[in-house]
Structures are given as structure tokens and as C-alpha cells.
Image: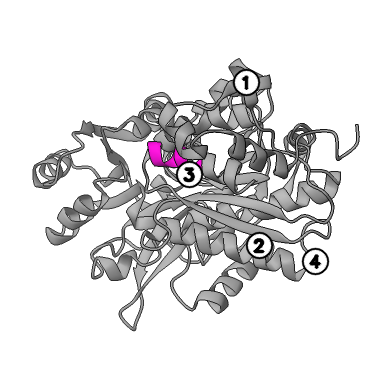
Amino acid sequence: MSENTSSRSSMSRRRLLTATTGGVAGLALGGCLDSAESVVGADTDDDESITIGLLAPKPDSNYVGRSMQRSAALAVDELNDGGGINGRHVELAVGNTNGNPLETRRQYQRLVLEEAADVTVGVFDSPSLVNILDDIAEQETIHLTSGAATTTPSERIAADYDRYKYHFRVGPPNDHHLGQGQVDFLDDMAAEVGWESVALLAEDYEWTKEPWDVYQTRLPELGLDVVMEQRYPPAMDDFSGVYDEVQDHGADAAIMTTAHTGNETVRDWALNQRPFAFGGIHVPMQLPVYYEQTNGACAYGFGLTTATAQSSFGGSTEAFITAYQDTYEGPNPVYTGYHTYDAITLFAHVVEQTGTLDADELVAALEDVSFSGTVGTVEFEGLEESYPHDFRYYKDQMHCFQWQPTDDGDGVQEIIWPDEHATSEYIAPN
């Protein structure tokens, strides 16, 4: 089948909008896409540009969204400086999701239908990603997630491959593997740093359920004494009582799984100078500006992530960070920036490898790809594995950093695990 006849063109999408009363707004208000006239992620004529659609939360003001937008723009600029993708100019269209599932869906439809995006990347929060899975299936357009961790997409692919196969997660590891990373860290490091007992604390949100299940299954195998387990209410804003219990149980470390309540957990640990270590899957602590934002309160806290400015994966990470710093002259990106950059450069790689924009051919290429990115090797689990099309988890590509003070009063996210990537040893809080 020829490239020009294998699927509808970008112009076909524009014709659909012209022929549809109310355009994308009408489709969104109707609650679903018109299944009788679906639009396919398609090849374009050789002289047309390739459009990449980015879905990011508040890129003008939100640190996570800004990291995604800047990283995407950097990747697109580098592609164009190198001649584009297969000689075609690359354009970036950005959709502000506002971190809202309904707005994410509206922006997804706009990017694919109005902007004629040949691929979409991004989406930070899991509810927003779940809300567009049927749209991705309907449009048969590749989507490369670079933020949300829910396992729902892989579950749907396993149940109905032909419909949902267009979704891939370029990163981070899914929520099950985030829990696995926490366990692997404790397995390797607890004895080394002198932790014999830990307290498990997790905010009671949907996203923490999968890691929590992993803890229940795997931690008993480590010989580590779990002296306290608590999933606390999402509305909690005072952790003094919880930390009293952690202290009374004699825990050497409080192992956290938190995002929405992350700031409060740091504040109450630091201000009261609790005699136990603190950290884990702590989303706010991943921000490269968090030390400044908390006036150093996060000092000696530790967190899991896939990359920081201290990371080194065969030179790709350093090159990306250098280009990012030179271009924006500001703080480094958070992990969503690394994954967004990788998503776009990976897409360019498979398009150049296959010589087509046909979505089905690109799905096959992505399923077999092994790509060297800023976070290490990017590969996807197969249909026979637990999480089809999910970012494959490699233990040595999960990093644990610790916020360590510098002599000039700043803080650095020094990598303390795994050993082969460590830039510093763990330092116990005073």
C-alpha cells in the first residue's frame, strides 16, 4: 500500500472540521467523537510539515507543564536544525490541559482535528490520560505518554489490542513499577544506611493503590521490619500526630508515597526535626527548585525519579541538560521534561526508520524499538508481558536522589542509588 493511500491525510481532518457543525467544540460538548467519521493518524504529502501535539498542564505557569513544553520545543528545534523528519519541517502545537480530564479531552480533539497532529505526546495526570484513551483509539493516532503512571492503558491494550494499540508510555515507569522501584531501593540500601525498621505512609488517592499493593507483597521478603502502615486521608494537613506514631514505633525511616500532600509532609518533618529519615515516592521533592521553594526544609530528604541534572546515561542526559540550560537559562526540567523530549525524538526515530507516518506500521516499529534516550534505554513491554506498551522497567534506570546542602546555601539532588549512577553517598539528617 502506498504512503499516500494507506490512510487519510491531514487535509482530510480539516475537511471533517469544515463539514462538522460546531467543529471541535461541538464534538466535545456532544461527549464523544463521531464514530461514523473517524479520522486516522495519517501520512502527509512529502512537501507538508509534520505536526507534534503536546498535552501539558498550564505550561506558562506550572513547573511540570513548563518542563514538558520547553523540552518539546527543544526537541523540535533540534530536529529542524538537522533537516526535520525525513526532510519534512516539524511543527509543535501545544494544548493546555489545565490538569483537568475534560479540558484534556477537548485539547486532544483540537490538536488532532484542528491542528492535524500526526502524533500526540504528554499528559501528566492519570485521570486525564484515562479520559482520552477512547479518543486515541477512535483517531488511530499514536499517543506517547510522558507523565501519567496509571496502568489502565496497558490493561485495555491487553483486553482489546486492535482498538487501544496506539498508546505507548515513554515514561515514567507505571505505578506498579514505581512501587517496585521503592522496594528495590530499600532492598539495596536499607542495611547499608542502617535502617532496620520503616514506617509506610501513603496518601489515600487512587494512584497510590498499586504501589501500596506492591509493598504488601514484596517488603516481607526483605527482612525489613515494617513497624507502621498508614494510608492517610487526602485532606490531612498536619502530620504531627502521624509522626509522633512513627517516632513511638522507633522507625528508622518514614517511607512516603505522596504528591498532593507532599509539601505538608516535608514541613512537619523538618520543623520538628524528627529523628527518622524521610523520603520515597515524593512528587514535589522531584522539582529541581524544591530546595529553594522550601527554604531548605527538604534537606536530607530523598526521592525516587527517573532522571535529574546529575544523571548520566551514555551522554544523552548531559547533552539534553546542557541544551536546556543554554536555551532557557533557568532551572532544570523535572522528569516529565526528559520523557517528553524522549517521546518526540523516539517518534522521529521510528518515522525515519520506517519511512512512513502510517500509524499501524509505527505501532509495529515501536513495539520492537530499543532507543537510547535521556533516561537510558526506552523499550516497551510486549503483549505477552504484564503491561503491554508500557515503558519497560529497568532497576538501574530508577534513581534515588537526596537533597544535599552545598557550601553556598543551595541544594543539589545528588544521586545516592543505584551505585553505578551515584554521585554522592547518603547523608543522615542531623
Q: CA distance from mark 1 to mark 4?
A: 38 Å
- Dot 3 falls on a residue whose secondary structure is helix
Number of other residues with Cα within 10 Å of mark 4, as a class: few under 14, some 14 to 19, many 20 or more = few
Q: Which residue is mark 1?
A: 36
Question: Which of pointers 3 and 1 lies earlier in the amino acid sequence?
Answer: 1
Question: Which of pointers 4 and 3 lies earlier in the amino acid sequence?
Answer: 4
Which residue is painted at 45% across and 75% down in the image? 330
In the drawing, what numbered circle is on residue 83? Answer: 4
- Dot 1 falls on a residue whose secondary structure is helix
Classify residue 386 by image quadrant: top right
Numbered range of the magenta stretch = 102-108
In the drawing, what numbered circle is on residue 107? Answer: 3
Q: Which residue is mark 2?
A: 76
- Inspect this view and state whether residue 321 appears: yes
Number of other residues with Cα within 10 Å of mark 3, as a class: few under 14, some 14 to 19, many 20 or more = many
Query: Number of marks in the image?
Result: 4
How far from the left and from the top, in percent, is residue 221?
Answer: 43, 28
